Amino acid sequence: MEEGSVLFQERMKLYEDTVACRRTDRVLAAPMIMYLPILMYGDVTIQDVMMDYSRAIPSFVRYHQEFQSDLAWGPQSIFPASALDTLGCQYLKWPGKQIQDPNAGFQVVDNEDGYMTPDEYLEYAEDPTGFMIRKLLPRHYSALKGLEMVDLSNAVWQGGLYAMIPMALPPVQAAFGAMAETGGKMMKVAEDGGKLMGMLAGMGWPSANDMACSSPFDLFNDSMRGLLNTTMDMIDYPDELLAAIETSTKMQVRYIKNTFITQPYVKTMTFFIHNGMDMFMSREQFQTFYWPGLKTCIETVIEMGGIPQIYLEDKFDDKLDIFADELPAGKCIFTLINCNLEKAKEKFAGKICISGGVDGTLLQYGTKEEVAANVKHAIDILAPGGGYYLNCDVSLDVAKPENLHTLFDTARSYMKY
């Protein structure tokens, strides 16, 4: 059996045992990386990769060969600049466009004109696909303005024939042309991403994240209504918001099931949680607006045979018991940011795999001794009994190589049950 295949199977077993909260011989270590290989090696810039995703491949292969992470991370949050330009994107800024620094990340533009209005929640709830086509996409992308004229909601019998008339209009044809061109560009991105992860798998690394998915609430929070608007709508428009979340939950469940059916390589699906944390939502608000939809999505991933990874982007100390009590044991990963580790271990032990525990800023600004001490401290608290996945409390963009080596070396040599 080839060495890459043996290593893949060993690492996959370590991963599956860790998720199932079984005791293992050592701690699984696979810190989530963002732009780290790009910035560490300096062979390309973030702008270069946004223009051509394949240019990230050498740096990411080099990173995994040098540090021997237990799982493979590909480039995260790399929006293809050419596709964004083709569509005339209105809600992002990126290097090479509005941002001069070629190694800066993208920025979301909080543009009120690009969001839905509160009186449109029910319109979305009644016809989500139609709303996306006629309302939201034209607001997000200037090249898709012509989609406002497309209405196939009654495209049956004679009405179906007359519904085709707008397709002959120049703005509609231009929108369809831009969509087709973008589709071709995104196929190339998908192929390049598959090539990278296939190479890493062949060298012995299982994927840490095969696909990302939003929680139903965050669909509005992130790009449809906006953070502040959606947060205030829990108070000002609760019924309308709940109706829309019910619909978005159905959309996400359909997306999850279709993903697992059509893409059998998918195993881990990550939910990056952009709201719901203690500083934004009370426990009651969370249980009313956020948790039901997210829980349904998590359960759907498990039903489809996948591993849901829930990336909590800030403190959830007041809600940890909800996760522990309401999710099946040994099926999920929760990455903790700013959470009380002792409390999390108490609530999650034997039930939910804990990811996190390491102060990511130490990797860039600390000493090797400080990094080693931090890793040991995290293992002492979180590893006993199993179910600990060593990760950082940030997605890494920068780190001193010697500190990263210390993190991995300590994780492999230090175990405490």
Image (cartoon, rainbow, N blue to C red):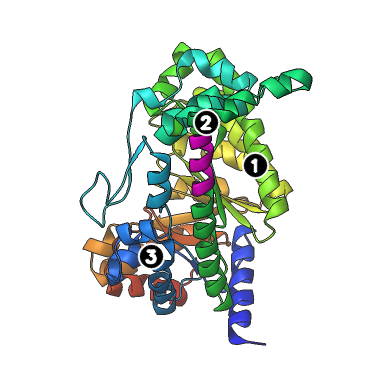
**Residue corresponding to mark 2:** 172
Classify the position of the N terminus by image quarter.
bottom right
Amino acid type at image mark 2: Val
Which residue range is magenta in the image? 172-182
Amino acid type at image mark 3: Val
Q: From this viewpoint, is residue 275 visible? A: no
In the picture, measured across the screen, residue 90 lies left or right of residue 17, that is left
**Residue corresponding to mark 1:** 255
Residue 149 screen position, x and y as percent: 54, 23
211 or 339: nearer the viewer: 211
Rate crowding at label 2 as few (under 14), some (14 to 19) or many (20 or more) other CA atoms within 10 Å. Answer: many
SS type, badge 2: helix
Residue 247 picture quarter: top right
In the picture shown, does residue 238 fall above or below 148? above
**Residue corresponding to mark 3:** 375
CA gap, disc 3 to disc 1? 37 Å
In this view, the mark in front (1 or 2) = 2
Q: Earlier in the sequence, mark 1 or mark 2?
A: 2
Amino acid type at image mark 1: Tyr
Q: Earlier in the sequence, mark 2 or mark 3?
A: 2
Q: Earlier in the sequence, mark 3 or mark 1?
A: 1
In the picture shown, does residue 305 fall above or below 71? above
In this view, the mark in front (3 or 1) = 1
